[in-house]
Image (cartoon, coloured by chain):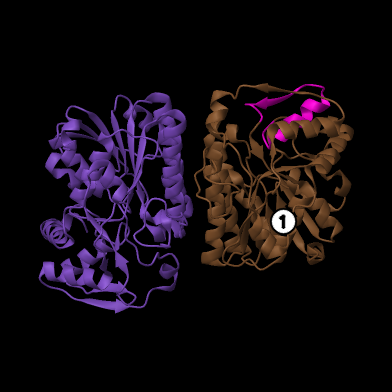
Chain colours: A brown, B purple
């Protein structure tokens, strides 16, 4: 299935559109012939970055506003066929330090978006970016969609509400909404200033700045990674199929790596650098989920999606991108 | 275990303290020798009613304010030993019609209460009133605490967030919080104006006003009921044990009744009245959970709690109360 053809001449809105996933999706959709509107608040702590859309800046409509701004959203969603709902607060630590802000963005704004769609564009199709964080500490591996939901931080609780609203509005009001539960996504245009999106961001920055990568703990913790192109594939595939009654899908990878292996691969692909270990900071340990990797069989069976890009290749491409574009991301 | 002795001279705050459960709890705690502060917004659509505390009105401190009012809560929680956190929006239908209001009360105010406790009274012990609504349509019966969480309305999603915050603050910040997931609670002082707390309320009103009880559907749907005195027992028992790592407990009853049986018993105990059937209104059907009754083994094993009052006896006492006090509740 070539999902791209599906979007030719379609009107698409992407919230968080100047962010990591939003901008890569925008570039792909522009090339597929879609009319793309990007909404982004450009809040400095989040992933929005105008440089992200440099390749397509003349071909997209950019609207700087916040998903919490009802009035702007009401105007923007009219006439759109697809809504890729990617705006969110992603930092686990920030969600604990400022839980009300996380609540506003990840819960209240989501409810507001759904109410707006219900009232002003009930035929729109929504794809919502959720997170593996809603599962909390895995009770078994790999984690499938039926795993108990026991979030270990405010962000996990709030993202869970956000996705439950989407499922509810799908069921009750027929607002077609699908949910992708993402694991660690990496690639060109990610946030590398700090660890607010994923720890891989700050590790990339460490390499570029000739600093050691810092691994918390003994490095044995398992993580799975998805390269951005694979994640974009998943968004387009899920958007192009019937929503159905059970529209929640894990992304993930069947080849997890330990943190130590991850650091080794990154140093190897970068051709330089080092890593060192540090005791897990007490508070971070409390909201850490331990080993994690996903079972993504459901989306595979439904859409044929598979993660195609090896971590080695993907991280190499990512490091090359940031070598060239470093100053736009720091 | 006699939990009441535990509260002698203890300082207790009850949010939703003029409501159905709050006021019955207050009466019991006053008799146990506790110093009781009641917080209630007296919002007309909710269950607060000054008549509810008539028997103890000279022995409690009443503070009319909203749990959304941070400043008042900050003052009120200081120096308290126990916080029975009962304030909430309970109507499933209202949560769909005004989802933001439900979000404010059942989510944001809960987060605010927990933040206030963390900052100003971290030694307080909280007992939070949650609901069976978080399970959604039962996938098996009786429903235990490990049942999947698939809420079917905004109220269910929001109450789930509220309880997850309590569990999180217990785990991360050691704010001792326990959660009771209530099923249909009934008894003296319940709201009978309408069906906003439980359908039993409006059924009682129907009987008192010589109107038919209206049963939606064919009357075969199963429900379980807890008499208020049993529910108060559960709150006091859970408050008086160690919180532990898994402080979430179902209440419920192992003797469920069909709606038709329920109506028959109520007519019989009232000594008059009738019931009739009506097609389920389409929208209500969408947010209905079908058959439900709870597995409450966990709280039984932990505290010895059992529902002691038969529905026949409990509903008789309830109807007698409302015969005498009707005009205070309409």
Residue A185 spot, x, y in % from top left: 72, 44
Residue A231 spot, x, y in % from top left: 74, 51
Question: What residue is pinned by disc 1?
Answer: A235
Closer to us: A1 or B268: A1
Whether A200 is among the magenta residues is: yes
Residues shaded magenta: A195-219
> Which residue shows up at 81% across the image and 57% down it?
A29
> Which residue shows up at 30% across the image and 24% down it?
B79
Closer to us: A324 or B120: A324
Residue A32 spot, x, y in % from top left: 84, 60
Asked if residue B263 is positioned above or below residue A280 in the image, the reply reads below
Residue B186 spot, x, y in % from top left: 23, 56
Residue at disc 1, secondary structure: helix
Closer to us: A193 or A119: A193
Asked if residue A190 is positioned above or below residue B189 in the image, the reply reads above
Whether B77 is among the magenta residues is: no
Residue A94 seen in the current view: yes
Name the image quarter holding residue A18: top right
Residue B269 vs residue B86: left or right? Answer: left
Residue A214 vs residue A150: left or right? Answer: right
Asked if residue A197 is positioned above or below residue A118 in the image, the reply reads above
- How packed mark 1 is, by other alpha carbons closer than 10 Å (few <14, some 14-19, many 20 or more), is many
């Amino acid at each position: 299935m070539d999902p791209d053809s599906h979007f030719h001449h379609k009107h698409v809105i992407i919230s968080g559109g100047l962010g990591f996933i939003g901008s890569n999706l925008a570039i792909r959709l522009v090339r597929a012939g879609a009319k793309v509107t990007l909404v982004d608040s450009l809040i400095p702590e989040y992933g929005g970055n105008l440089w992200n859309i440099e390749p397509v800046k003349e071909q997209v409509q950019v609207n700087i506003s916040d998903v919490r701004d009802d009035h702007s959203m009401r105007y923007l969603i009219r006439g759109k066929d697809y809504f890729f709902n990617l705006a969110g607060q992603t930092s686990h630590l920030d969600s604990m330090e400022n839980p009300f802000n996380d609540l506003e963005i990840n819960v209240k704004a989501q409810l507001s978006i759904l109410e707006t769609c219900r009232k002003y564009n009930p035929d729109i199709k929504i794809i919502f970016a959720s997170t593996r964080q809603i599962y909390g500490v895995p009770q078994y591996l790999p984690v499938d969609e039926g795993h108990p939901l026991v979030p270990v931080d405010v962000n996990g609780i709030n993202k869970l509400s956000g996705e439950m609203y989407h499922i509810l509005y799908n069921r009750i009001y027929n607002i077609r909404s699908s949910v992708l539960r993402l694991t660690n996504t990496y690639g060109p245009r990610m946030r590398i200033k700090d660890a607010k999106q994923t720890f891989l961001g700050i590790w990339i920055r460490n390499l570029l700045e000739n600093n050691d990568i810092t691994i918390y703990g003994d490095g044995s913790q398992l993580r799975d990674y998805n390269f951005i192109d694979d994640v974009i594939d998943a968004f387009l595939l899920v958007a192009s199929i019937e929503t159905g009654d059970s529209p929640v899908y894990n992304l993930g990878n069947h080849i997890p790596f330990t943190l130590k292996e991850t650091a080794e691969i990154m140093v190897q692909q970068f051709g330089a650098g080092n890593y060192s270990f540090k005791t897990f900071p007490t508070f971070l340990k409390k909201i850490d989920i331990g080993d994690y990797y996903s079972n993504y069989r459901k989306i595979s069976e439904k859409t044929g999606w598979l993660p195609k890009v090896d971590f080695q290749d993907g991280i190499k491409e990512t490091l090359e991108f940031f070598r060239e574009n470093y100053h736009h991301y720091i």
